[in-house]
Amino acid sequence: MQIEKRIALVTGGSRGIGRAIAVRLSGTGAYVFIGYIDNRKAASETLRIIRNKGGNGEICRFDVSNFEATQEAIKNIVEKKGRIDILVNNAAVSISSIILRAKENDWDTTININLKGTFNCCKSVSKYMVKQRWGRIVNISSVVAEGGNAGQVCYSASKAGVLGVTKSLAKELGARNICVNAVAPGFIETDMTASLPGKSKEKIIDSIPLSRIGTPYDIAGVVAFLVSRDADYITGQIINVCGGLYI
C-alpha cells in the first residue's frame, strides 16, 4: 500500500489515533503535515517518531473550528508543496455528560470542533483536489454515531454528522476522482478512554467479540488502506473498526 510522494494532512495528529495515522502514512511514503492546536511538544514528538523511521513531514498549527485559519493553513500547505492529496479529519473532543447535566457550551464546543472542523477542512481542500482531479479524504467518526451511547449525546451527534458529510461529499466529488470515506473506531486505547475505571473497561472487553480494546494502530492501518491505490473503487463507505462491538 504505497502512497509515495503524496502530500497528507492529519488533523489532531499530535497524539493517540492521529499520531498513529501520521506515522503510518509517512511509513508508506507520504509527506505528512501534523495538524495540532495547543500541544506543540506532542506534535513535535510525532514528527520525531516519523523522522526516526525514515519518513518526513512537518507540524502545522491551526484551529479546525475556525474557517479562516483552516483555509489559510491549507493554502500554506499547497504553496509549500504544490498540492494536497490526502486529508484525514481526526481532530476531536469528547465531553461526556447526560443531557440533564450537559451545558450549552458542551454542545457548541463539540459540534464546532468535531463537525464544523470536518466541514472546514473538507471545504478548504476540495478546491485543490478538484483542480488536481485526485484526492482522498478520510473522516474519523465513531461507532456511537450509529449506535449512540448514554452520556455522549453531544459526541454522538457530532460524529453522526460526520457520516452525513462523508456520504454527501462522496456523491459530490466522485466525478473528480476524489474518494471520501469514514472510519468509525470502537473503544480504542487513547487519552479519551484512559480515564475509564477498571471495572468499566472489563465490561467493555466482555462486550467485544475479539475480547480486547483496540489500539490506535488498528485504526491507522485502515486509514492507510483507504488512501492507497488499493482502495480506488471505494467511496462513501463507513468502516467500523471495533473488534465486532457494533455488528
Image (cartoon, rainbow, N blue to C red):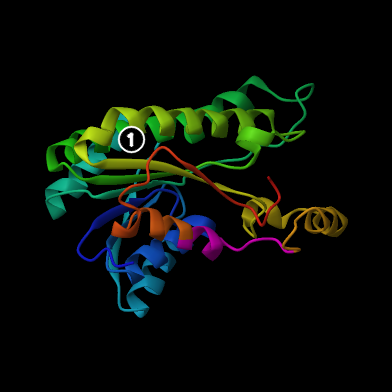
Residue at the spot of label 1: 122
Where are the magenta residues, as a range?
Answer: 212-221
Quadrant showing the N terminus: bottom left
- Residue 160 drawn in magenta: no
Quadrant hosting residue 23: bottom left
| Whole-percent x, y for residue 32 in the image | 30, 60
Vertical position of residue 16 compared to residue 246: above or below? below
Instruction: Using residue 176 as the reference point, say whether residue 91 is left or right of it.
Output: right
SS at circle 1: helix
Does the image show residue 113? yes
Q: How many neighbours does mark 1 have within 10 angstroms: few (below 14), some (14-19), or many (20 or more)?
A: many
Residue pictured at 19% horizontal, 33% vertical: 127
Give the amino acid type for the residue marked by disc 1 in the picture: Cys
Instruction: Using residue 25 as the reference point, say whether residue 72 is left or right of it.
Output: left
Does the image show residue 44? no
| Whole-percent x, y for residue 170 in the image | 35, 34
Residue pictured at 85% horizontal, 54% vertical: 203
Vertical position of residue 138 compared to residue 29: above or below? above
Quadrant hosting residue 3: bottom left
Q: Is the magenta stretch mostly helix, strand or loop?
A: helix
Residue pictured at 69% horizontal, 33% vertical: 148
Quick one: 49 or 202, which is closer to the camera?
Answer: 202
Vertical position of residue 33 compared to residue 184: above or below? below
Quick one: 97 or 86, which is closer to the camera?
Answer: 86
Quadrant hosting residue 125: top left
